[in-house]
Amino acid sequence: MDEKGGLLEVAKLHDACGVVGISFNETGNNVAKFIYYALYALQHRGQEAAGISVHDGKSIRTHRGMGLVAEVFKDAQIDILRGSVGIGHVRYPTTGRSCIENTQPFLVKYKDGAIAVAHNGNLVNSSQLREQLEQAGDIFYSSSDTEVIAHLFVKELLKYDLQEAVRALMRKIVGSYSLVFLWEDTVLALRDPLGIKPLCIGEVDNGFMVASESAAVDTLNGRLIRDVRPGELVVIKKGEMKTYQLARMPRPAHCVFEYIYFARPDSILDGRLIYDVRVNIGAHLAEEHPADADTVTPIPDSGITLAVGYHQRSQISYRECLMKNRYIGRTFIMPDQSMRETAVRLKMNTIRPNIEGHKLVLVDDSIVRGTTSRRIVDMVRRAGAKEVHVRIGSPPILAPCYLGIDMASREELIAAYKTVAGVEAVINADSLGYVSHKGLVEAVGIPKENLCMGCLTGIYPVEIPGEKCMAAQTKLSEYLNADATKD
Ligand code: AMP
């Protein structure tokens, strides 16, 4: 425990990822291929590692590795993963923990069988839980909180039936979790009682699937059925699906950053198309922070939809001024120090004639440390921009995320210690405008009490030592102990 009562430990375990689970009702051997395509659709949620577990009728086989989905899986690996039911995971780069042991799905074997687990989210009490388990003699293979979940779940399954075991698990783990388990030949999906991270259900040919985002369902030519409800367990066996509402909180706390940055614009999260939300945010930005400019331009890719919204509302021309190279993968050889400019330009280049002599509104989703904005403002100035007005589709990020977005520590967050004018000076903009909390909430279309805005307010939906907690959520354990009815 550090002097902030375990805060540093919580902060180290950030884990933003993508998960998928598919169960076909006909015995076949190609589910791994479908999971592979679904993971490809979720690649933006994690580029550090990928893995798939499939039940082949007798046992669970897993293949995991570091890198992009296409780097980890070739035909040979997919061919080995034979079966009609399985789960998959893509992992986001996390600070200092990039090793094969921490890749997922995580497989545990116990006396009654085996379970593979894939997790999107972050537990805030995993170090305490781990300590308790270690005291009791459990041995851990990785440093990830997913292994803690796997151990706890197995212990509960040995004592109770499935629903009771999941209830007992939910009473112990605190934080954000969209979990997909492969429990022998059954896919289980569980969303935390606050529904912090996304998870949806889709129908595909011959079966059902669950995935972090509906774009994965679309990719498999499936039909989005609905989101998994907060506190709900989904059980899919041999292509048959059942759902159980095991916990009911008075209100959810959906991660607002999914809407701002993380999710794909073509995904529908908790009933909202991300594209529409971002166009709305851009429109609010234009209302709140007009600019005397002749060109609206995004920082690609995350600023594109926001800039469209700004352009539509302000009637200022939309023009692309920056071109991003989307093919810089992990194997990219970094140019040495003397070629720094080449390195920067390889990633992003200017379209000079669109910039020279123009007054720009430069739109991005967020400022974290301030380095991206500073670098790009400088770049467009060197390309001849007359003025650069930066507009940001989130309010200032002034507090860390403990619940599943790999952001930065408080010390690194520029808005944690600088005013808007201070940030404006650092990024060298002629003006800087962030969307307001009110504008953001209106654009998302979900009441603010139902959103986790911890990174924007410093107030979190679960209790975190040393941090403020949303009043309505402090009684999490009380709600989890109450009965929830079966659907
Ligand atoms: P920074 O340069 O540290 O201010 O980061 C801001 C840039 O990072 C913006 O262009 C965002 O699109 C992007 N960004 C914001 N949040 C994240 C995140 N969690 N992971 C990776 N990139 C991010």
Image (cartoon, rainbow, N blue to C red):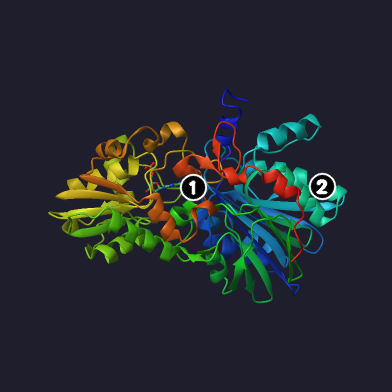
Up the image or down, 194 lies above or below 218; here it is above
Which residue type carries mark 2?
A: Glu
Q: Which mark is residue 156?
A: 2
Chain-order first, disc 1 or disc 2: 2
374 on left or right of 96: left
Instruction: Name the foreground residue: 169 vs 461.
Output: 461
Q: Is mark 1 within 8 Å of ligand 1?
A: no
Outermost residue to the top: 3
The reply to whether callout 1 and callout 2 are in contact (CB within 8 Å) is: no
Give residue 199's quadrant in the image.
Answer: bottom right
Which residue type carries mark 1?
A: Met
Badge 1: residue crowd in 10 Å (few <14, some 14–19, many ≥20): many
Give residue 355's quadrant in the image.
Answer: bottom left
**Callout count:** 2
Give residue 301's quadrant in the image.
Answer: bottom left
Residue, disc 1: 453
Outermost residue to the left: 357
Where does the image place residue 43, in percent across and percent down from the top left? Answer: 51, 57
Instruction: Name the foreground residue: 380 vs 324.
Output: 380
Residue at horizontal 53%, vertical 59%?
42
Question: Which image quadrant: the N terminus?
Answer: top right
